[in-house]
Image (spheres, rainbow, N blue to C red):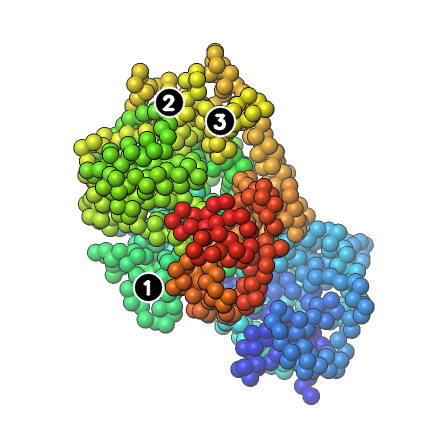
Amino acid sequence: MLNIADHHVIWGKTDQSRRSRGNGGSAWNPLTAHILDTAACTGRLWDRYLTHGMRLRLAEAFGAGDDETARTTVMFLAGLHDLGKGSGCFLRTFGTGIRDDPGLRGPELAAWRILADSVRLPRDGHPDGKVNARHEHITAAYLPRLLGCGCDNCGDNGNEASGLHSVALLLGGHHGHIPSIDTVHRAAGAVAFEQWEPVYQPLIAEAAALLGVTLSDLPDLVRPERPSVLPMFTGLVILSDWIASSDDHFTYRRLGDPPAHWWSQSQHQAEAATAKLALDRWRPQDRTWHNLFPGTKPRPFQAAALAALPTSGPAMVIVESDTGSGKTRLAFAIAHHLARTCGHQGLFMAMPTRAATNQAAGELASFIEHSTDYPTASNLSVVHSAAGASDLVHQLIDASTTLHQNALGSLPDSIAAATADSSERGRVALDPWYLRRCLGLVSTFGIGTVDQVVLVPQPAQHWTLRFLGLAGKTVIIDEAHAYELFQHEMLGAAVEWLADAGASIVVLSATLPTSVRETLVDAWCRGRQVTLKDTARPGPIAVVDQHGTVRRTGSAKSSEGQEPRVRTEVRLQPLPDPKALATRLLREASDGGVTAVIRNRVESAVELHRTLIDQSTLHGWREAEIVLLHGRLMSRDRLPVESRLLGALGPGRDRSLPNPSRPHRLLVVATQIVEQSLDIDFDAVYSDLAPIDLLIQRRGRLHRHALNRRPRWCQEPVLNVFWQPDTSLLPVVEPSDEALGRPRGNRDGYVYAPFTLAASWHALARRTDETGRAVIGAEENSTLIHEVYGPAVPLPGTLGQLLTRTRASWQASLTNAQNEAVARPLRPYGRRGRTRVTAIDLASGSAHGGGKHDGAPGIAALSRLGEPSTEYLALYLQDRERLTYDPQGHLLADTRYHPRDTRERRQQQKDFLLNTLATPTSWFNARRLPPPNAWPRIDRPALRYRPTALFDPTTGSCVSGPHGISYSPSEGLSR
């Protein structure tokens, strides 16, 4: 019989995929092998992925400032994350994975037990199963003692190695939640330590010898005190463990082979895995503006911003400029500069909506190609809940497959158009691995919804992996004015963490309330632990360096010295009824013109669209010339509309010419989705009364692309704002309430705070002439914002009463949001900015959820305070057997089981995402509809654990699932 060390018989992985046995290998992998695989992955990530700044922080915590010592120490500690698998609690679970495999639970288990008995591996100390613990918590319980801590809790009366206890807690969180001290203490009681210590010690000694670690140095060497090091280390362990656990990259080791041979295999396979996944730092080449954005030159405000950037060190940059002025390109250029001067690992761009993310991803892909040299392959990850439904994502995945097959052909035109210097361009692709939970943020380049950044400071499951992904990047926060108070507070906490880690922040906005600007700048300085030094010089661009010194600069003028956008005429008009408005719109653009009507509510958008369709024939319009777009359309129906609008109303491929695809006339009825999401240009814009910051944003879709030719009737940009007057000619902004004597109301008050509607009306009305018209330029944005959101100014009469009453309600809601915002986030230096967070403070659990409206109320991590919704798959029931994605019955739904990462599985998941609907939770409560777990289950392999609603293809009514709702491909979800 082979001479096998006792600890080599501890299994770490079983062959759930049957891949190892299919290749003639073992049914299980020794724990030691997985420890070495994880350590090797950590070493490769240290070399390829971590930035210089991240390594400096880890060197301070794990190597007394020495990079190589820290690298080896972190590799060793990361490898020991699964030490607790050496316990009866874990070993008794052999063959009990999620896949049904009688072979593992039968003969393979029997063979392993015989081997375990032959080396006298300790038996389960609690065969009745009453005492149990998770293996990661057992690691947290005993690792300090095994690595040399001499405190009372470790069974000695010597000195406490507090750093080892901190690291043990962090390793105990490698499955997503860092455990509490109580959890760790309970785990200690589940293991007969005296029996297992003789097994643990040679395992640890063997790993230390292979990696070159001196165990006696660890108690004094390991001192993770800087707050950002704590989640950074845990995230690195999780990432290394996930890579090392993949059967795609790592093979099972053979018992009897020398451990040195195992270690050699681990290093080779870790190198191949990180290369295949393109886990690399961004290495941008020296580029001019023209190189990065061919055919353009920087506007003065863009050039001024770049000139104000520090020559070394991270920075926060706040850019306030009107929509369409070039903020996005400036942000990319800033990220390029910071990557070259600071060595940032990549960039992540946070967008307000999924639609905005999908659109901007193509522009980011083009920038990546022009900022790196061929044949560099860079991952661009699109990060939001429906990313897998995006055609761009699948094109990137296909490009990744092509690259790995060494057939380096041209990328699809939809990713980036060919340019004159295409021979020098880099490559952009996406490995499907990055579609998994939280991994999108780990990709060198990423773009997603702002939710990803908002969740950074909240202890949701795997939040440390999310933090690792952003800690070395330039994080761009787009449309910063568009977020609610809760999100701004969460962003402030996130900025603190990222600043402490050495990341950079770029904030883009048309204009920011002073309070928001101050929140973000103060957060940067707290994270950097510096005092703000502000010269108070005016300018729309603020650069705050690593020492807290503010430099302001910039002009919103174009390269010709003129404002990039002419002044806009704003017309306040009483809201007409749908029929009158439809007649006006159809007549006005009958001879040409592209008009947008932006409604605050889906219901009012649908009603107007129906009315327009009813009147279209009478006025000589075709239905195809009238478009409806809102968020209650499933992606299968909404994405083609967005694509059509982008192609027809976007800037076109050649930005130096008018878009040749622009239609002669078009009417678009939409909700807020167009104000932040799509780079499209309208000749005329009508809007419901909305908060002033959103009206400014809606104005940005008016005459956005200056090259387009306009019909005579809309040569000048005019924003028409509809409001509901009451009998005293003040705006109706509150919902009806019979008890308060308000029989007539405005349901828009459920969408936006009535005060912000009333104050925005007042800010515009006081600027209008007797005809209700005002002319407003971009230079007035800040003033308008301050008038609405700044300190209250008492006004006499009924207007003053309206503002006072609604302001009190608004402030109460802000207080509630503030309380929610204070309760949830972790802050690196505490709420007062002076007390460092410790590993103990990072403890979390299932009550904190995973960032998807799960967990306990008041505790769970949230990306926004808006009403939660229930997501489910929507299919059409054609007959008893056939389920389809479309009501016509042409697209048969694939409900079979497909293994992960196969092309069939990816296509299936894409189709499922395209047919996913989200229903507000209040709909269920109001109509007493059952929650998803009470819906009928569909007996199909891919649907057994997925909430699914079936709709009648003829009527659109729900026939299985949440009864009382209907869906129309043209009008969306309704009740």
**Circle 2 sits in a helix, a strand or a loop, which is it?**
helix
Horizontal arrangement in the rendering, residue 143 relative to residue 678 (left or right): right
Dot 1, crowdedness within 10 Å: few (<14), some or many (≥20)?
Answer: some
The image position of residue 553, as x and y in percent, is 35, 31
In this picture, residue 631 sits left or right of residue 412: right
Q: Secondary structure at mark 3?
A: loop
* Residue 209 image offset from top left, x and y in percent: 63, 70
Q: CA distance from mark 1 to mark 2?
A: 54 Å
Disc 1: which residue: 375
- Amino acid type of the residue tagged 2 in the rendering: Leu
Q: Residue 424: horizontal and vertical position, in percent?
A: 27, 59
Instruction: Report if residue 580 is visible in the image.
Output: yes
Left or right, 942 with reference to 661: right
Q: Which mark is residue 104?
A: none
Helix, strand or loop at label 1? It is loop
Query: How would you rate the neighbour count of disc 3 (Cα within 10 Å): few for under 14, some for 14-19, many for 20 or more?
Result: some
| Residue 924 position in % (x across, y down) | 58, 45
Residue 675 visible in the displayed image: no
User: Which of disc 1 and disc 3 is earlier in sequence?
Assistant: 1
Q: Which residue is mark 3?
A: 745
Q: Quadrant of residue 550?
A: top left
Q: Residue furthest bottom?
A: 1
Which label sits in the foreground, 3 or 1?
3
Amino acid carrying label 1: it is Pro
State if disc 2 and disc 3 touch (CB < 8 Å): no
| Residues under numbered marks 3 and 1 in contact, where contact means CB atoms less than 8 Å apart | no
- Closer to us: mark 1 or mark 2? 2
